[in-house]
Image (cartoon, coloured by chain):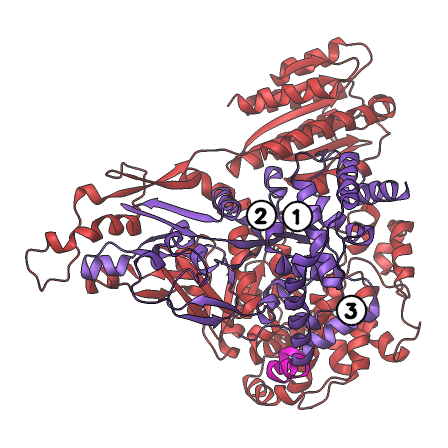
Amino acid sequence: MDPLDVDARWADAALAIELLAIDPWLAGGVVFKAWPGPVRDQVCAWVTATVSGPVLRLPLHITDDRLLGGLALTQTLQRGEVVLEKGLLGQADGGVLLVPMAERLPTNLTALLAAALDQGQLTIERDGVGGLFPCRVGVVALDEGLEDEATPVALSERLAMHVDLREVTPRSEPSRQPDATRVVAARARLAKVEVADALVEVLCQAALALGVPSVRSPLLAVAIARAHAALEGRVAVEEDDVAVAARLVLGPRATRLPESAPAPDDAANDSPPPPDDERDGADDDGGPGDEGPDVSTAEVVLAAARSAIPPDVLELLTVGRAQRTGPRSTGKVGAARASTLGGRPAGNRAGVPQPGERLNVVETLRAAAPWQRLRRTDASSRRVEVRKDDLRVKRFVQRTESVVIFCVDASGSSALQRLAEAKGAVEQVLGDCYVRRDHVALVAFRGSLATLVLPPTRSLARARKCLAELAGGGGTPMAAGIDAATGLALEARRRGRSPLVVMMTDGRANVGRPGSHGLSPQEEALRSARLLRAQQVRALFLDTSPRPRPQARALALEMGARYLPLPHLDARVVSSQVQGLTEAK
Amino acid sequence: MALFPFSAIVGQDELKLALEIAVVDPSVGGVLVFGDRGTGKSTAVRALAGLLPRMRVVTGCPYHCDPSSDPMACPWCQTATGPRVSSEVSVPVVDLPLGATEDRVVGALDLEAALTRGERTFSPGLLARANRGFLYIDEVNLLPDHVVDLLLDVAASGENVVEREGISVRHPARFVLIGSGNPEEGELRPQLLDRFGLCLEVKTPQDLAMRVEVVKRRTSFDRDPAAFLGRWAQSEAATTTRLSEARGRLREVNVADAAIVRAATLCQALGTDGLRGELTLMRAARAAAALAGDTEVTDAHLKQVATLALRHRLRRNPLDEVGSTVRVERALAEAFAA
C-alpha cells in the first residue's frame, strides 16, 4: 500500500475514534477490519484512551445471563431476597463494547447488541427477575474475517463507521493520534450543531447512488456529519463534514459504483464492466443532477465516498454477487455451541446432575423456596437450605442440524441438456429441506473451477436466487468440484452440523487440477472421491447422463456414495433419497 | 425513553393500515411484519403505544380486567374483597425482550416471597401484563420454537394456564400478537405463518424525497424528542380519535351476503386452507370500512385488505418464482373483474 494511503487510513482510524467518543451510542460504533497485531492493538488502546465511559471487552462465548444480567446468585442466596445484577451491556452504559472476532459473532448475541443499539436501554426478563437498565453503548467491532466472512449485517449496519486497516503495514507509524480534549469540547457543542436540509439530501442521494439500501445508513451519515462539525468547532454542518461522513459511513457500504465514477484502474483492466441490470438500477435512482440541491457538493461527497469503496465491489458486481447481504453468520458459532451443550434447552427435570449435565440454579431455588421456613432450625438464619430433592437439571433436546451440500455439474457435457432438470430436483429438495429446517449449500463446477454458489443457509429466498442465476457450459473439473464439497462438508462438521453431499453429474471428468502429476482428470476425480470417503461424509451420487455409465458408478463407489442412475431425473425420488440419508444418522 | 410518533412515520402505508386494523378489531388475530433492515418495522409497532385509546380496568388487578367482566374468570378478582374499583390506564404494549426465559413469559413462583416469607405465590409474567393489549416480539424468527408455540397457543385461546412448581393458575391473556423479523436471518416455521391474522412485507423506500424526509424527521427527533413530540401531538391526537371512532363504529358496519360470497370466491380461487382465511378477510375488511367511516363492506375494502389477510395462507410452494403477493393480486383482479 502507498505510504500516503497508509497515513490516510491511520488518520481515518483516529478520526473515527474521536467521532465515536463524542457520543458512542449516537454513532453506533465502528467496524475495524484489521488483522490481529500491532495495528489492531493500537486501535484498541486508542479507544480505551479516548472514550470517556467504560470500555469493556465482549468475549464471544459470553452467556446470555452475563451479557444481559439477571439474578445475582451469591447476593440472592446470602440475603435471602432477590437481587438483580447488571450484565456486561448494563455495565458498559455510556461507553463502548469491544467485540473481537466480530465475524464470528453468533446470531443471538448480534440480536441482543442490535436491540441495545436501537433502544439505548435494555429490558430483561430472565430467571425470575425483570428490570430495565439504561444502556447507551457504542460497539467497536474488530473484524478479522477473510473474504468470505464478515461482521453480521444486522450489527455492522448499525455501526456508523467502517474503516479497513488490513493493508496498513504493522510497522508504520500512526500519522496522528486521537485528541481526547477535542472530543470533550465537541461533546459540549454537539447539541447545537445544525444541519441544512440540502446537505441531508446530498447524503441521501449519495447513498442511493452507491446502492446502499438501508435508510439507517444516511441517518448515521447525518449523525456523523454533525459530530464532525462539532469536532471542528462549528455549529453548522458544512460540505467538509458531509464529505467525511460519506467517506466513513457511505463509501464502505457501497454495492455499486456511482454513475460518474471512473472505474479503479487496476480493476478495470481485467474485469468486464458491471452487468447491465446493475447499471439500470443506478439510472432509475437519478444520479446527481436531477434537481439536486447543489451539484458541486454532491460531486465532492461522491468523490469522498468513492475513496472508501471496498476494492472488491467491482469484482463482486461481475460475479453478480454484489448483494451479499445474507447472514453467513446464521448461527455459525451458535450452532457449534448449542451442540456442545447438547441441543436446545427443553425445560428441566428433578435429579442430581450427572457428569456433563448442568444444574439449573434458579429452578432449584424455586423448588427449595417454599420449604425454607420449615427447614430453618434457627429462625434468624437467612441461609437458604437446599436439599437433594430440590435439585433441578437443565434438559436439552439433542438435535444436530443437517447441511445438504449439492455439488452440481454445470459443465457443457452434463449441463446443457440437464441443468434445468438438475435445478428442478435441487428445488424440490430445497423445499423439503426448508420444511425440515435443514441447511442447504450449493457448489457448482464448470470451466476450470468449482465455485461456492450458496454458502450453507436456511434462507429459501437466497437459495432460489442463487439457483436461478446458475449458468451452464464449459469443461468438467470434477476433482475440483468434489474437493470443494469435501471442504464444505468438513467445515459444516466443525460447526457441529452433520453434512450430506449430493453429487449431480454424468461422471465424465475432463479438466484436471492445475499442477496435476500426470494424472488424467478422471483419475484425479477418483482420488478426490477417495478423500471424501476417508472423511466418512455421507454422500449420494445422482448419475444424470442419459444412459448410466461405468465411470459414474466407479466414482460413486470410490466416494462411498449411494449410487442412483437417474435417466430421467425425478425430483421426488431425489428428495426422498436425501430425506432418507439425513434421517439415518 | 421517548417513542417516535406513529403519525410521523413516512410512507409504510400497508404497515400502518395493518396495525390500525388490529387496534380497531383485535380479533383479526395478530400481525406479522417481515422486511428489510432499517425500514422502521419496530419503530412503527412501538409507536402504537403512544396513540392507543385508554381503557378502564379493575384497580389493582395485575391482569387489568375489564370492570364489566366476570370476576370469576380472573384469579385476582376472584379473591379480591370489597367492591370493584375501576380506573383508566393506557393499553399495554409489551415488548418481549430477546433472551427472555419461559418463566418470565408465562409467570412462575414468586421467588422472593418464597425465599423470605415461605409463601407460595404466583408472580404473573409478560402474558399477564399484555392482557387486553399488544405483545410485540421483534426478531420473532430468532425466538426459540417452544416459546413461539406457547405464545401462539395462548394468543389463540385467550387464556394462560400455568402448571409448574406446585402452582396452578389460569388467567385471562387476550392480546394481539405482533411479530417482526428479517427473513434473511432465518425463516419462521411455515406452520406458524397462518396463525397470524395479517402478514405483510415491508420494503425500503427507494424514492429519494421519501428517504430524505425519513432522515430529516428521525434526526430532528433524536436531537430533541420532546420538541418533536410537541410538534406532532396534534396529529397523534387526531389519529387516536380516528381509531377510537372506528372502534365504536365497528359494530354498525354491515356485511352483506354479497361481500361474503366475494370473499369466499377469492379464497377458493387461491386455494387457501381452512376457513381462517375467509374469517380474517371479513374481519379485516370490516375494520377497514370502520376506519374509512363507511357503514357497509364493499369491494374496495376487500381489495384493500386481501393481500394482508391472505398472502401467507396460500398453498406452500416455497420455490414458486412468483411471490405470493403477486398471486393474491392476480386472483383479486380475476375475482373482481367478473
Q: Tell me residue A80's x, y (percent).
A: 21, 62
Question: Whole-percent x and y of residue A333?
Answer: 52, 46
Callout 2 secondary element: helix
Q: CA distance from mark 3 to mark 1?
A: 23 Å
Which region is colored magenta?
B220-232
Callout 2 crowding tier (Cα within 10 Å): few <14, some 14–19, many ≥20? many
Q: Compare marks 3 and 2 and give the one earlier in the sequence.
A: 2
Asked if badge 3 and badge 2 are on a common chain, one would say yes
Marks 1/2: CA distance? 8 Å
- Name the disc covering residue B329, or none: none
Please tell me if label 1 and label 2 are on a single chain. yes
Name which of mark 3 and mark 1 comes first in the sequence: 1
Secondary structure state at the residue bearing disc 1:
helix
Identify the subunit bearing mark 3.
B
Residue A421 percent coordinates (x, y):
81, 24
| Subunit that carries the residue with mark 1 | B
Label 2 is placed on what type of residue?
Answer: Asn
In the shown orientation, is residue A433 left or right of residue A308?
left
| Colour that chain B carries in the picture | purple
- Residue occupied by mark 2: B141
Of the pair A269 and B56, the residue shown nearer to us: B56
| Residue at the spot of label 3 | B211
Q: Residues within 10 Å of mark 1 (few under 14, many from 20)?
A: many
Q: Amino acid at mark 3?
A: Arg
A493 shown above or below B91: above
Instruction: Choose between A239 and A580: the one closer to the eye.
Output: A580
Residue type marked 1:
Pro
Quick check: is A13 in the magenta stretch? no
Front-lying residue, B111 or A225: B111
- Chain identifier for the red-coloured part of the image: A
Residue B191 in the image: x percent, y percent? 60, 37
Q: Which quadrant of the view contains residue A450?
A: top right
